[in-house]
Amino acid sequence: MDHLRTEFERLPAETPLWDGQVQVVQVTNATEQTMEVRFLMSAKNSGQAWDLRVHIREKMIGYLQREHPEALPKSRVALEKE
């Protein structure tokens, strides 16, 4: 979580969509296999808030793929002929 928080603290300031008011990270759910993380930010209006959420989500997933790929879920499937 510390790595995610550090990256998230940096990202919103890089876009004019963020109004600088709200920036919060919350773990909203955790199971034995997954963890759900919520990134809260504020914007001037609902359209900019949507664009900001999409932008940050893409950046955070890219960060995890580059820096911590082991943190992303993996599924293994065995295909069998009938």
Image (cartoon, grey):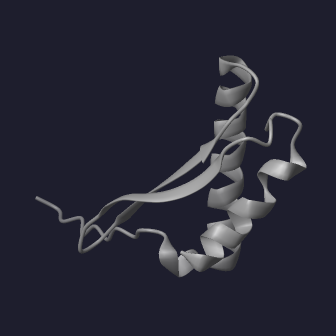
Q: The C terminus lies in which quarter of the figure?
A: bottom left
Tag count: 0
Q: Residue at x 37, y 65 (%)?
A: 35
Looking at the image, residue 65 sits to the left or right of residue 16; the answer is left
Up/down of 16 relative to 60, above or below = above
**Residue at the far front in the pictured view:** 21
In which image quadrant can residue 81 be found?
bottom left
Where in the figure is residue 6, as x and y percent of width and height? 70, 71
Up/down of 43 relative to 81, above or below = above
Where in the figure is residue 64, as x and y percent of width and height? 62, 69
In which image quadrant can residue 74 be found?
bottom left
Looking at the image, residue 65 sits to the left or right of residue 76; the answer is right
| Front residue of 26 and 33 | 26
Where in the figure is residue 29, as x and y percent of width and height? 32, 58
Q: Residue at x 51, y 80 (%)?
A: 70
Looking at the image, residue 72 sits to the left or right of residue 9; the answer is left
Q: Residue at x 63, y 68 (%)?
A: 5
| Front residue of 80 and 1 | 1
Where in the figure is residue 77, as x and y percent of width and height? 28, 67
Looking at the image, residue 18 sits to the left or right of residue 76; the answer is right
| Front residue of 69 and 6 | 6
Up/down of 67 relative to 81, above or below = below
